[in-house]
Amino acid sequence: MILWINGAFGSGKTQTAFELNRRIPHSFVFDPENAGYYIQKNIPSRLKKNDFQNYSQWREFNYSMLRYIASEFEGIIIVPMTIVEPDYFREIVGRLREDGIKVHHYTLCVSRDRLLSRLRSRGEGKHSWAANQIDRCLIGHQHPIFAEHLVTDNMGIEQVAEAIAAKLQISLLPAAPGRMRRFIQRLKVKYQHIRLFDR
């Protein structure tokens, strides 16, 4: 099974993915962004695009890798990735489903103000690349292809993870005991995923 967690930048995709990963035995977090950063670092400047999702190679690589992992890994593959273009979604998720791979997709929906607040908390201002994508994401995710939507403004990470697990009828291990321990876990995830350059 592949579990794709979508949403605007700052919606909590990565934190939710790693919360699920900690609480679902035999699960794995796959990060499609890694292929994008590889492409951007290994291509002549004049060939660079403004968003690595616009490279057909990025879409093909992630489809191929997910197809391979799903065929060899006996567990749940969790994919935290913002994707807004329906055609790009079809090229990856649509093809995986055509191959007979079960892909569950959820879009985390958060208000614009809350997204900006979360981006500020991780050092990204209102003019950052991620902040400039908010409106595009909020509009794009209204497309029916990006259902099912989860409104998470007033939910903590544990609650979001538990809501997704409940929809999939997956039993979770208990959350880490202690507020400080959970805070440290999230801090580690946050700093492990800081990007020092744009997409």
Image (tube, grey):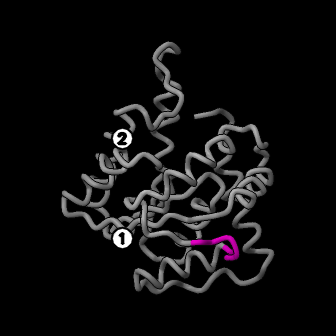
State how far apart marks 2 and 1 are (Cα): 23 Å
Q: In screen coordinates, is 179 left or right of 148?
A: right
Between disc 2 and disc 1, the foreground one is 2
Classify the position of the N terminus by image quarter.
bottom left
The C terminus sits in image quarter: top right
Q: Which residue is mark 2?
A: 59
In the image, residue 37 sits, relative to residue 151, either above or below, namely: above
- Report the residue at 47% width, 49% height from top: 84
Span of residues in magenta = 151-156
- Where's residue 72, x and y in %? 27, 60
Residue shown at 36% from the left, 41% from the top: 59
Magenta stretch: dominant secondary structure: loop
Which structural element holds mark 2? helix
Tell me: 126 left or right of 56.
right
Mark sitting on residue 75: 1
- Say which residue appears at 56% left-offset and 75% top-offset: 161
Residue 138: x percent and y percent? Answer: 57, 54
